[in-house]
Amino acid sequence: MSKLVSIIIPVFNVEKHIRKSLNSILNQTFNVNDVEVIMVDDCSTDGSGKIIDEYSKKYDNFKAVHLDENSGAAGKPRNIGLEEASCDFVMFLDSDDFFVENAIEVLYNQINGNAELDIVLGGYQNIHGDNKQIVLPFKNSDESYFEDTTNCIDLVKINPAISAKIFRTSFLVENNIKFPEGIPGQDLVFFLDAFFNAKNVLSLNNFIVYNRILRFDDNDKSISLNVTSKYILGLIEAYNLTLDVCMNNHVNKNLIKLILLSHLQFFTNQILKDSLSLDELSSIFVSSNFENFKNHEFFNQAAEFRLIFKNIENGIFDNIDLIKYIEYNIKKEIYYNYDNITSLLKEYKRENEKLLKSLRIKEADNIYLKNRNVELNLKVNNVESSKIWRFKNLFE
């Protein structure tokens, strides 16, 4: 009997946590027999490999895959998992996190019930000891539906957290969407590539899909919390690939800027931690990774980023205020135009209503004006619920 959902789990040195992750799949409200679990061990040096072998022997729908050499990041294990996946839909779970009990059921029912959807996503919860933080995509509605994904300003509000999403497998295969290998930040590149190629995306704004465990212990630390030169160089490469994905998909210029600015804030916070010495930081910013990034063709049309790069080259690494200032001005320009266009369309609508009332003609002769007013009303509604770069088509 064929399965319905593939779940891919990259595994590396998580013997203290992986059982909870795997058991969160076994304890789903969704029928576990309709799930295939693909666990890919990236040459763990602890007991993780033995644990996934234990589960694969006990459960027929759990498959353990062992790589011959360590790849250095979750990208390759995830890609191997995608090659092994046989179901119509695919989800991902990090081996130190765990699903809420109805995660698969809720996401599957949404994407399976609408053939036009390629991605369905939700939120997640960060957990560190007794501290919890809920991260949701949007707060103003229960659901958000996206069609014009390459012009969607709301994208900057969506965390790339890969475990909070379900994907149509055929969509990923047809568009050759894969994870970059050997670097951190590969989930960002993968998600943006998927989002920009998707026909339609549904966001469940009040649904938590999984719990993300933050590990700060020096002997058991989450990858994103273990800041090294290699990690920072990998992030720079991921941002370079992000720009490639955006430009290849002809994403709106202002949207690319906002995506990049949001992640440069994270990047700056990472390099300002005490983990790196000044010598290490200096070597990072004369590396080929950084040279390739700052010379990316996108910055020919985004000169404001040159200010950030110039500061870094002069040893000024704290650019948070500058990043926020640039971000503020981009958003100010967007919403200024948004307000102007909304006002203009409303004025057209009011004038047309006056004309309709003043005319005393037969119903048949009045059809054109009535239809025109309906069109204007729809356009006003569209503007009020959309963002500035979707407005240009209204006047063509």
Image: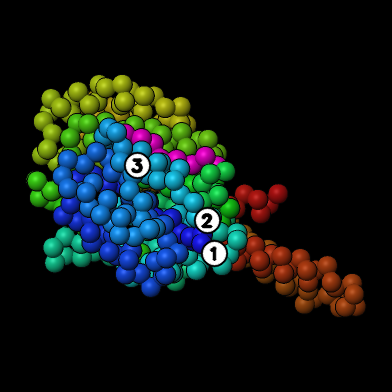
Question: Quick one: label 2, few (<14), some, or many (20+) residues within 10 Å?
Answer: some
Secondary-structure class at tag 3: helix
Q: Answer yes or no: do the residues labelled 1 and 2 have beta carbons within 8 Å?
A: yes
Residue 88: numbered disc:
2
Residue furthest out toward the front: 57
Tell me the CA gap for discs 2 and 3: 20 Å
User: Would residue 365 appear left or right of 311 to someone viewing this image?
Assistant: right
Which amino acid type is marked by label 3? Pro
- Residue 163: % across, % down: 35, 55
Residues drawn in magenta: 175-185
Q: Main secondary structure of the magenta part?
A: loop
How many residues crowd around disc 1 within 10 Å: few (fewer than 14), some, or many (20 or more)?
some
Q: Secondary structure at mark 2?
A: loop
Nearer the observer: mark 3 or 1; the answer is: 3
Out of 118 and 24, give the one closest to the viewer: 24
Work out how far the residue at label 1 is from the one at label 2, CA to CA, in angstroms: 9 Å
Q: Which residue is mark 3?
A: 77
Q: Amino acid at mark 1?
A: Asn
Q: Which label lies toward us, 1 or 2?
A: 2
Which of the numbered marks, if any, corresponds to residue 315? none
Residue 178 among magenta residues: yes
Rendered image quadrant of residue 166: bottom left
Q: Position of residue 86 (x, y in %)?
A: 49, 51
Q: Is residue 159 visible?
A: no
- CA distance separating discs 3 and 1: 26 Å
Secondary element at image label 1: helix
Q: Position of residue 242 (x, y in %)?
A: 41, 38
Q: Residue at x 88, y 78 (%)?
A: 363
Q: Quadrant of residue 369?
A: bottom right
Total marks shown come to 3
Q: Relative to the observer, which residue lies in front, 39 or 190?
A: 39
The residue where tag 1 is placed is 112
